[in-house]
Amino acid sequence: MDYGTFLIQNNNKTKGFELYQKSHKIYMNNLGLKHPSTSQCFLRFGDFYFEQNNIIKALQYYQKALIANVQDFNDTNIYVNPYSEKILLDNYLLETLKKKAKALSCLANSQINKKNKIKALSKSLETYEIAVNLIQKIRFSFSTEESKLFLMENEKNTLIHAIHTALALYEETGILSYKTKAFEFAEKSKATILLASLRNNDAMIFGGIPDSLQNIENEIIHALSSYKNFIFKEKEKQNPDKNKITLWEEKVFNLNIKQDKLIAYLENKFPSYYELKYNSKIINISDIQTKLNNNTALLEYVISDTLLYIFTITSDKFEVYTSQLDSSFNKNIQTIIKFLTVKNLMLHISGEYREFIDAAYNLYCLLIKPSVNSLMEKDIIIIPDGKLAYIPFDILIYSKTDKEIQFNNLSYLLKKHAIGYSYSATLYFKDYSAYKKKSKNVLAFAPTYKNRELLTLSEHNERVNLDPIPGAIEEINLISDFFNTDICKDHNATEEKFKALAHNYNILHLAMHAIIDNENPMFSKLVFSDNNDSIEDGFLNTYEIYGMKLNANMAVLSACNTGYGKLQQGEGIMSLSRGFLYAGCPAIIMTLWTIEDNSSLEIMKNFYSYLSDGKNKLDALRLAKLDFLKNSDPLKSHPYFWAAYINIGDISPVTGSNITNNNYIYLFSLIIILIIFGIIRRKNV
């Protein structure tokens, strides 16, 4: 069969097809109809006819492949699918479902009759739904995050095709449910692994399941992962052992059945645990509109190779906009990134200034302008996709100018809207209140690096300068003007102390260096003071943050590049901030590039000032940036100095005892004055 594929790919189609027929006869004689290998043979036939543009014949063979792979499914009608509940985990079956869905979509495009077109499209959408549900089940069966990330990265296109099919049906029929279904697929392409991890944490805390059942569940998952790994490695060998592969595939088959039975038992006996852990539901449009206030809009983006989808949601509107993409899209993004992160700002001569304005305006026209009628005077929550996660939308420009370099006078989107971000809409509206207990207010850290001027990273043998941060101490001290703050600075700002204290506080503020590892995001780290501790090395790695349980409602990562990291398709940016979200912190203030010290100090001072006045996090950050722009000279108003900080997650005002000691004195004095005034007035009467 493989040799047949080789010949077909090298234009010897006749001989290749003959080998397919021969392999089919061998499979049927030795393994019978109901076998994964027989299914694979039918799949090759389907691919052959699909390449010949014989869509009906291809669909017939894809249907045969489904029949061969699903034990009690025997319907040869190409418009019939097996029930999702009867489908066991199988990557070949997933491949068959995806190819059948794609072929049905192609069949729809060839139909002149509208009724036949809608029939083919609706069946394509149904097939994609079954495939997406199978992807979710396969993801649950993986024990390692690396395997889950690999799966979701490879299946991003499946979800994009499903979105496209749902919107095509909406255009043909005008039925709203197809448009909402497109959004559902969009959400399932966003940070599903992070969401599942958070739900797993919820299940462990609130599910009420016995340890014995948890152990059985984990044993099945680890065994499945091991046998799949054995099969993969054996098939990679030059001379794979077929007997071993057959044995391990049988083990996987039996474990899948065992897992399905366990999940059914958990659903029946421990519904809370089942609902929390195995719930792959995403938030729907109706719930979003109920939760959004009248002053907030949500924009969710999905990017394919050639198309951009914008899902625009307000409390009373839901629209989807589709735009064509060309090479200028990525070019504009790269122009923005380069312009914002270049270290020598004097390099920004007039030509580069014009390039920035053109790129920022072009991206505004593409990303924001289609939704502009829904965004009037509203805060905007952005759910980015792909490289959009590296761009602060604050700096997009809604009108061009012919004037010479004047950064503070540009028409930034910041001047119209407060803008926040989230990995997904479902995550944005996740309720963290069950975790939260009454806590102290602010814990602030500003380490010293006197013993760490130069660091060698053993993982990549790279040397990193850990220069002193002159404004860090002042930055954490100024927070005390607005909030009750416990400060750990200089040699007292250790990793050990952070781990011991962090769970007691409502706000965490970390003014320190960060080291980003794009190859291994779990080894990105925050750098604390070195106290020569035998247990803690002073580097708080992302994987360590994952292991913490935080009670904070906000973490301010006032370090360089804390929102930067490896872009993982289907999950977003694998930054340090992700670890804090996983640890239970619903809002992160983070940076997208290396920040300038004095600018950071001014922005943070104004940010906390507005927070203490009761502003929500988005408004506080926006007003702090606008103040900076208003008071800056032409050079310092460059976006490099003010646009790095962004808010990801919850935007609500900071709660808790946000009154400083000085405020208490003023309040107490006012009360005394009022009492005295009341006594005097009574005597006069």
Image: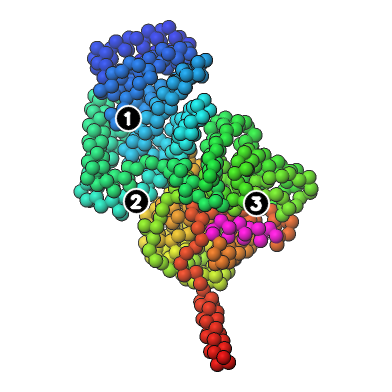
Q: Give the x, y percent position of residue 338.
A: 64, 45
Q: Which mark is residue 84?
A: 1
Badge nearest the viewer, 2 or 1: 1
Residue matched to label 3: 416
Look at the picture and state if 131 lies above or below 188.
Answer: above
Query: Is 144 situated left or right of 429 in this image?
Result: left
Query: Is 497 situated left or right of 351 in this image?
Result: left
Q: Which residues are magenta?
A: 616-630
**Frontmost residue, 66 versus 513:** 66
Query: Is 592 situated left or right of 264 in this image?
Result: right
Circle 2/circle 3 CB separation < 8 Å: no
Tell me the distance, in whole angstroms, between the alpha carbons under discs 3 and 1.
47 Å
Residue matched to label 2: 201
Q: Residues within 10 Å of mark 1 (few under 14, many from 20)?
A: few
Circle 2/circle 1 CB separation < 8 Å: no
What element does badge 2 sit on? Answer: helix
Which residue is depicted at the point 53% across and 54% down?
A: 647
**For the residue marked with disc 1, what is the amino acid?**
Ser
